[in-house]
Image: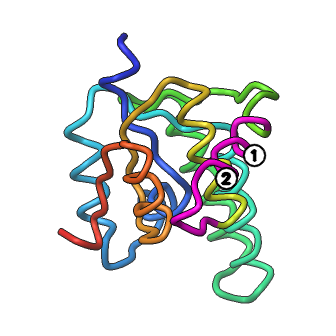
């Protein structure tokens, strides 16, 4: 499948697939409309970290944490999701993007998501992070930002 038709999902959106937040319905609708949604190993890691942090922070029980983890794992077997590992070059690309983009500040993990998109050949991003969205747009990426819809 052509990478230009794919949509990259970051953890701010993937988490909304797992639990209910104000933008969850919009995220689910956006995903349902896609033929291929790329979940990088970075997105998967960040999602796992957030799930555990919420459990350890007392936001929910261990049983609920385990339920969310099972739900995340089940996405690997569902269309339109395509889980993909990232090559080591993603870090060099992130550095190059950071140095070349003086207009927008972007946090390190968000910068890595944008570099991951470049490494995976994906030009469309689903995020709920306004700063990351602005930086992605500066690189010419198409951005779906459910919080704006």
Q: Nearer the viewer, residue 69 or 80?
A: 80
CB-based contact (under 8 Å), mark 2 and mark 1: yes
Mark 2: give few (<14), some (14-19) or many (20+) Cα within 10 Å.
many
Q: Secondary structure at mark 2?
A: helix
In the rendered image, the vertical position of residue 67 relative to residue 57, given as above or below: above
Magenta highlight on residue 104: yes
Q: Residue at x 61, y 27 (%)?
A: 119
Q: Nearer the viewer, residue 3 or 59?
A: 3
Q: Nearer the viewer, residue 72 or 107?
A: 107
Q: Which mark is residue 95?
A: 1
In the rendered image, the vertical position of residue 36 relative to residue 52, given as above or below: above
Q: Residue at x 53, y 66 (%)?
A: 104
Magenta highlight on residue 74: no
Range drawn in magenta: 92-106
Mark 1: give few (<14), some (14-19) or many (20+) Cα within 10 Å.
some
Q: Quadrant of the C terminus?
A: bottom left
Q: Which mark is residue 98?
A: 2
Q: Secondary structure at mark 1?
A: helix
Q: Is residue 100 left or right of residue 82?
A: right
Q: Nearer the viewer, residue 148 or 102?
A: 102
Which color scheme did the rendering employ for the protein? rainbow
In the rendered image, the vertical position of residue 16 relative to residue 29, given as above or below: below
In the rendered image, residue 133, in percent from the top left (x then y), is placed at 41, 61
Instruction: Compute the Cα span from label 2 to label 1.
Output: 5 Å
Prevailing secondary structure of the magenta residues? helix
In the rendered image, residue 22, in percent from the top left (x then y), is placed at 31, 79
In the rendered image, residue 94, in percent from the top left (x then y), is placed at 70, 44
Q: Residue at x 62, y 37 (%)?
A: 116
The answer to which quarter of the image holds residue 109 is bottom right
Q: Is residue 38 left or right of residue 42?
A: left
Q: Is residue 116 left or right of residue 26?
A: right
Q: Residue at x 46, y 68 (%)?
A: 129
């Amino acid at each position: 499948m052509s990478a230009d038709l794919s949509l990259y999902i970051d953890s701010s959106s993937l988490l909304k697939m797992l639990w209910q937040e104000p933008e969850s319905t919009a995220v689910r609708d956006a995903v349902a409309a896609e033929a291929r949604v790329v979940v990088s190993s970075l997105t998967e890691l960040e999602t796992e970290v957030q799930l555990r942090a919420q459990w350890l922070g007392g936001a929910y029980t261990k049983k609920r944490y385990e339920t969310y983890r099972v739900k995340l794992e089940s996405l690997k077997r569902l269309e339109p999701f395509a889980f993909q590992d990232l090559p080591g070059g993603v870090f060099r690309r992130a550095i190059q993007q950071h140095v070349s983009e003086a207009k927008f500040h972007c946090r390190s993990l968000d910068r890595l998501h944008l570099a991951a998109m470049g490494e995976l050949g994906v030009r469309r991003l689903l995020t709920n992070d306004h700063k990351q969205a602005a930086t992605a747009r500066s690189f010419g990426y198409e951005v779906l930002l459910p919080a704006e819809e």
